[in-house]
Image: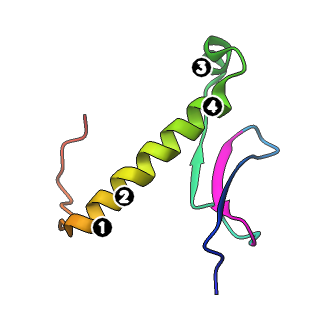
Amino acid sequence: MPSPFLEIVELANGKVALRRSDEDAEPLVIIEFSADAREYLQGHHIDVAKAMISAGMQVAGQVMEDGEPHDENRILH
């Protein structure tokens, strides 16, 4: 049974990943910042990635609560 605990880690390639804490399987989410973005964030890219993942998990929870059907033709803003 997969762990209910998740962790945010920086991978060896510099990407930030969300993964189950007890698995070496493929991460659930990967965030990659360009060199320009990393330079602009002055070393705070991990904090930004954490905020992005947190916001995404909140929206995922709302979608699961609301039971909205997935629409393949959504407009992304």
Per the model, the C-alpha gap separating discs 3 and 1 is: 32 Å
Q: Element under label 4?
A: helix
Per the model, the C-alpha gap separating discs 3 and 2 is: 26 Å
Q: Residue at x 57, y 30 (%)?
A: 48
In this rendering, the answer to whether 70 lies above or below 37 is: below
Judged left or right of residue 71, residue 52 is right
Per the model, the C-alpha gap separating discs 2 and 4 is: 20 Å
Location of mark 1 (residue): 64
Q: Where is residue 62 in the image (x, y as percent from the top left)?
A: 29, 58
Location of mark 2 (residue): 60
Location of mark 4 (residue): 47
Q: Which of marks 4 and 3 is nearer the N terminus?
A: 3
Are discs 3 and 2 less than 8 Å apart at CB? no
Are discs 1 and 4 less than 8 Å apart at CB? no
> What amino acid is labelled 2 in the image?
Ala
Image quadrant of residue 47? top right
